[in-house]
């Protein structure tokens, strides 16, 4: 069954990546088809596996400050900054709705 | 001749005895990097810092105080490892110009041992791919394309056509690292391995490619693809060298809490002569559709080799093997969707000029910075993670993962020490043929024999075995028990000694040979 335009639009919002063209959508359709093969496997009574190291305890270190004070180094790689702040464009402005966007999905 | 030597017995000894100096070695390697530029194996060449490191190493040797076997040895690092002061791009527009503020733990460890970092090697963008063809700096060419062995076997339609259109891929995604080691520009290289990305190019380029047990080597500083499967990979020209590299890199890292806390003792590989106590498993499912008859024959010959030497060789079954690729597809895209979320243009990397809103800036930045492969995986991953799909895809895949891991547990519990399988379905294909299929299809095809080891977290190694009818390398894979690298490498070393894989015959290397060095045995026999 094909993926609806609503879901595609939802994905673009979640991923903040767009499908760009029909090839992108095709790609997703094929990916889903490919993944559907998983349903051939009987997994009754099987627990999901998060990590191959699940039988061990994750290492926790002491809560001591051992490094830091590298503001200048970290700011070096940012394009827009003011004093010690990374500068972002205004937030709280949602991505325009599908009808108003320049997304290729708009005409789907 | 020194260029062709392995670490353990050859070049290291030469450095110690003063037959060659670190500076000479470094300069020679840098020069060879330049003359093999057409391979496109390197993205960044750190010439100045490498020469400085070589100078420091030379001082230490003069004082008679080298840091260890790796002191003065030129190495290369895949461009998805952070290297302080050196650009780290992941072959993506997203990180072009990004200068790492720190060294990945594995890089730091190598530098602390005195290794000389020549440069960063080329890869598929963000390590997504199996050809090293999908990065923004272009594809990597397999050095064997220019070997006498390949040229002798290929029938070019015209003299000019063959050099340009006949070249074969390195495999991927650590193709640059594999090509760098294969063409003698460095003695060892770091790769990464999530679905086979170190072993696959190792097989195609005729070098040793080791994927360590998950949790043995620190991932701190390795730009992550799939956190639950990624491992740093080691590429060398012989198994002994891989053991040396492993010895310098393995061990708990407080900066990576997924590294195990067991103490790791570096080891020297024994020269195994008696294999009668060994039990080799041959998993029948690895006779996968599409496996070339050539490789099938080689695999069979290898099994016979062990049998005739007295080892126990038995057929085993890993029933869920064929679902490994599907399982990987879901888990990988899901973890990728999460891992790639950090690239928003604010703190580092590419930033779009779009500034109407945060979200539109993020969206534009990611549109401009990622290639289609990356974007495709992010979108697929987000799909599988949607509330309505989470149980049916993500959780389902995690369950199948357990079944795959359990397959291996059962087999190793039954007394098998090491598994022997092919690494790839065929020898390296020409680039023009490779690009006819898309990245996902190719990855699904090419990872089929290597992926399950990542799924189960097991150590695995590619050992170059023989040349194909086309004159290209073919390797075989050994998969070992968790954290039993010593046993795995011991078996691999024995096998390497039996097969005597031939040395690549490259014009460029021949031309470099007579300058500095004398004796040096070749790396292909120990």
Image (cartoon, coloured by chain):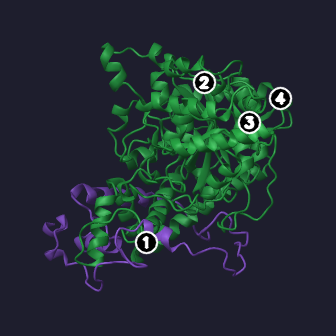
Chain colours: A purple, B green
Q: Which mark is residue B310?
A: 4
* For marks 1 and 2 on the same chain, the one whose residue lies earlier in the sequence: 1
Instruction: Report the mark closest to the observer, 1 or 3.
Output: 3
* For marks 4 and 3 on the same chain, the one whose residue lies earlier in the sequence: 3
Task: Look at mark 3 in the image and give the residue it sits on.
Answer: B240
How many angstroms separate mark 2 from mark 4 (CA)? 22 Å
Residue at 69%, 82% in the rendered image: A63
The answer for which chain carries disc 3 is: B
Judged from the image, the secondary structure of the residue bearing numbered disc 3 is helix
* For marks 1 and 3 on the same chain, the one whose residue lies earlier in the sequence: 3
Q: Is residue B319 left or right of residue B250?
A: left
How many angstroms separate mark 4 from mark 3 (CA)? 23 Å
* For marks 2 and 4 on the same chain, the one whose residue lies earlier in the sequence: 4
Q: Residue furthest bottom?
A: A92
* Residue closer to the observer: B322 or B40: B40
Judged from the image, the secondary structure of the residue bearing numbered disc 1 is helix
Q: Which mark is residue B385?
A: 1
* Residue closer to the observer: B106 or B172: B106
Instruction: Report the mark closest to the observer, 2 or 4.
Output: 2
Judged from the image, the secondary structure of the residue bearing numbered disc 2 is strand
How many angstroms separate mark 3 from mark 2 (CA)? 19 Å
């Amino acid at each position: 069954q094909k993926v609806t335009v609503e879901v595609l639009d939802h994905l673009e919002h979640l991923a903040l990546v767009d499908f760009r063209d029909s090839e992108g959508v095709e790609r997703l359709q094929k990916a889903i088809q490919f993944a559907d093969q998983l349903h051939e496997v009987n997994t009754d009574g099987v627990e999901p596996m998060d990590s191959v190291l699940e039988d061990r305890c994750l290492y926790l270190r002491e809560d001591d400050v051992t490094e830091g004070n590298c503001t200048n180094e970290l700011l070096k790689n940012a394009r827009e900054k003011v004093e010690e702040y990374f500068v972002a464009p205004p937030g709280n402005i949602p991505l325009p709705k599908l009808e108003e966007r320049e997304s290729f999905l708009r005409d789907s | 001749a020194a260029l062709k030597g392995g670490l353990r017995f050859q070049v290291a000894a030469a450095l110690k005895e003063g037959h060659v100096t670190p500076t000479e070695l470094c300069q020679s390697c840098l020069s060879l990097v330049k003359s093999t530029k057409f391979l496109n194996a390197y993205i960044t060449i750190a010439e100045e810092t490498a020469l400085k490191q070589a100078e420091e190493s030379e001082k230490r040797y003069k004082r008679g105080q080298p840091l260890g076997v790796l002191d003065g040895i030129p190495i290369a690092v895949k461009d998805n490892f952070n290297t302080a002061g050196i650009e780290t791009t992941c072959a993506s527009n997203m990180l072009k110009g990004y200068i790492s503020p720190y060294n990945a733990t594995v890089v730091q460890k190598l530098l602390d041992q005195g290794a000389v970092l020549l440069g960063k090697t080329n890869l598929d963008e963000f390590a997504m791919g199996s050809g090293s063809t999908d990065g923004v700096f272009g594809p990597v060419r397999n050095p064997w394309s220019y070997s006498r062995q390949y040229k002798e076997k290929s029938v070019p339609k015209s003299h000019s056509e063959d050099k340009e259109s006949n070249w074969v891929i390195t495999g991927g995604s650590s193709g640059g690292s594999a090509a760098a080691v294969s063409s003698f520009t460095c003695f060892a290289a770091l790769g990464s391995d999530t679905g086979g990305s170190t072993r696959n190019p190792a097989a195609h380029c005729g070098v040793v490619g080791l994927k360590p047990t998950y949790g043995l080597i620190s991932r701190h500083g390795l730009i992550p693809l799939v956190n639950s499967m990624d491992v740093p990979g080691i590429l060398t020209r012989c198994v002994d060298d891989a053991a040396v590299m492993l010895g310098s890199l393995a061990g708990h890292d407080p900066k990576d809490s997924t590294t195990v806390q067991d103490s790791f003792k570096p080891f020297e590989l024994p020269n195994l002569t008696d294999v009668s106590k060994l039990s080799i498993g041959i998993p029948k499912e690895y006779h996968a559709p599409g496996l070339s008859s050539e490789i099938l024959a080689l695999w069979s010959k290898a099994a016979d080799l062990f049998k005739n030497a007295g080892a126990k060789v038995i057929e085993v079954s890993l029933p869920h093997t064929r679902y490994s690729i599907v399982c990987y597809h879901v888990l990988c895209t899901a973890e990728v969707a999460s891992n790639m979320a950090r690239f928003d243009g604010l703190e580092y990397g590419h930033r779009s000029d779009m500034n109407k809103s945060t979200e539109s800036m993020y969206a534009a930045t990611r549109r401009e910075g990622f290639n289609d492969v990356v974007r495709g995986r992010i979108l697929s991953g987000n799909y599988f993670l949607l509330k309505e799909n989470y149980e049916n895809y993500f959780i389902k895949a995690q369950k199948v993962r357990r079944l795959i891991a359990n397959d291996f547990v059962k087999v190793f519990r039954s007394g098998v020490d090491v598994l022997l399988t092919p690494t790839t379905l065929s020898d390296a294909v020409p680039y023009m043929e490779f690009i006819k299929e898309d990245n996902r299809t190719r990855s699904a095809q090419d990872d089929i024999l290597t992926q399950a080891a990542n799924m189960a977290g097991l150590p695995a190694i590619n050992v170059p075995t023989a040349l194909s009818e086309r004159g290209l390398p073919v390797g075989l894979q050994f998969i070992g028990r968790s954290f039993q690298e010593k046993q795995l490498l011991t078996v691999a070393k024995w096998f390497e000694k039996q097969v005597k894989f031939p040395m690549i015959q490259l014009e460029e290397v021949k031309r470099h040979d007579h300058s500095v060095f004398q004796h040096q045995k070749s790396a292909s026999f120990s």
